[in-house]
Amino acid sequence: MSANDSSNTEIRAIRFHTYGEPADVLRLERTDMPSPGAGRIRVAVAACGLNPADWALCRGLFPGALPRGIGLDVSGVVDAVGEGVTDVAVGDRVLGAADYAGAPVAGASDFAILDHWARMPANLDFAQAAALPMAVETAYRSLDQLRVTAGQTLLVHGAGTMMGFAAVQIALLRGARVFATAGDTYAERLRALGAKVTAYGNGMAERVLQMAGGPVELALDTAPVNVSSAVSGALPDLVRVVGGDPRRVLTIVDFAAVAKLGVRSTLTEGGPFRWDVLGEFAQLAAEGRFTIPIARSFTLDDWRTALDISRSGHARGKLLLLPR
């Protein structure tokens, strides 16, 4: 291992030791510096993005050894490399995904172990970089599962979420004709990107069908399930929008409705994770051709405020923790 290492160094990390509600089980504490295993790297965390998946982990999603940390999205500077790592070196700026399962800390800490990463372009800042990984990977993989290609019509429901915002951009880059549902916060930005946008709520399906001149070919549901019924619970409408075929609809959130309606989900579709595209989208972000909106940034000490805003369903952009 090549490292700026001290096995006796203590770091700060947000972790949970038992499963339960995030506000009850998470705490900021001091713990030992983690060491990267083979094929892993350690980074000094500059920024960490928060996602709803972090709170699901606390409740038992993907159970594993405890204690565990939160924060999948990471940007920072390589501090140590494990055996077999040859593509980055100590001192390199990277973005990537924290090792959720194989390390006792994750991205919401002073140092994190990454199991997927890409070099950061010189003109991409750490905050922009930390907003990318999970949104890019999930959106790209979901569009792969739907087999979205040039010339197709696609509806992204919940395009004001970060996964939805990413999916709209990726689909447009693929040459698809994109329709979107979104609230006022991001509607104009989505239109500026090239999507045709309508509001949530009553009549949404009819508005989309009118905009599209008939059924669209595919629909992706990214709307959170913890907000108003005008936003969530729209899968029956999405089935109508695609002409009645539930296999043309894929959800990344409403897994409880999958069996009942016959739609597809990211959990059941399989296929490889697409961490391999992070470098490509980091470069696009550096060129101003791709973005994930950032709402607010917090220190590690202010993590509870970030939690409350995230769980409200009204973050209106990516929430970041900045350990440094």
Image (cartoon, rainbow, N blue to C red):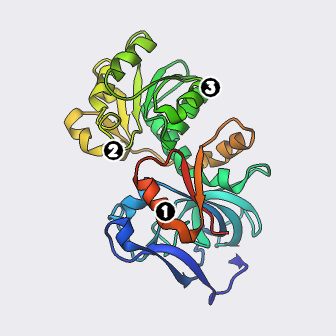
Which type of secondary structure does the marked residue at label 2 adopt? loop
Question: Which residue was labeled with disc 3?
Answer: 192
> Residue 182: x, y in percent?
46, 31
Numbered circle sitting on residue 237? none
The earlier-in-sequence mark between 2 and 3 is 3
Q: Residue at x 54, y 23 (%)?
A: 176
Residue 17 visible in the picture: yes
The earlier-in-sequence mark between 2 and 1 is 2
- The quadrant of the image that shows the C terminus is bottom right
Q: Amino acid at mark 3?
A: Ala
Which type of secondary structure does the marked residue at label 1 adopt? helix
Numbered circle sitting on residue 305? 1
Q: Residue at x 73, y 53 (%)?
A: 125
Q: Quick check: 227 above or below 30?
A: above
Question: Which residue was labeled with disc 2?
Answer: 225
Residue 26 is left or right of residue 9, and the answer is left
> Residue 233: x, y in percent?
28, 36
> Residue 102: x, y in percent?
48, 70
Which of the 4 image quarters holds residue 265?
top left
Q: Quick check: 293 above or below 77?
A: above
Residue 86 is left or right of residue 68, and the answer is right
| Distance between the alpha carbons at the discs numbered 3 and 1 | 32 Å
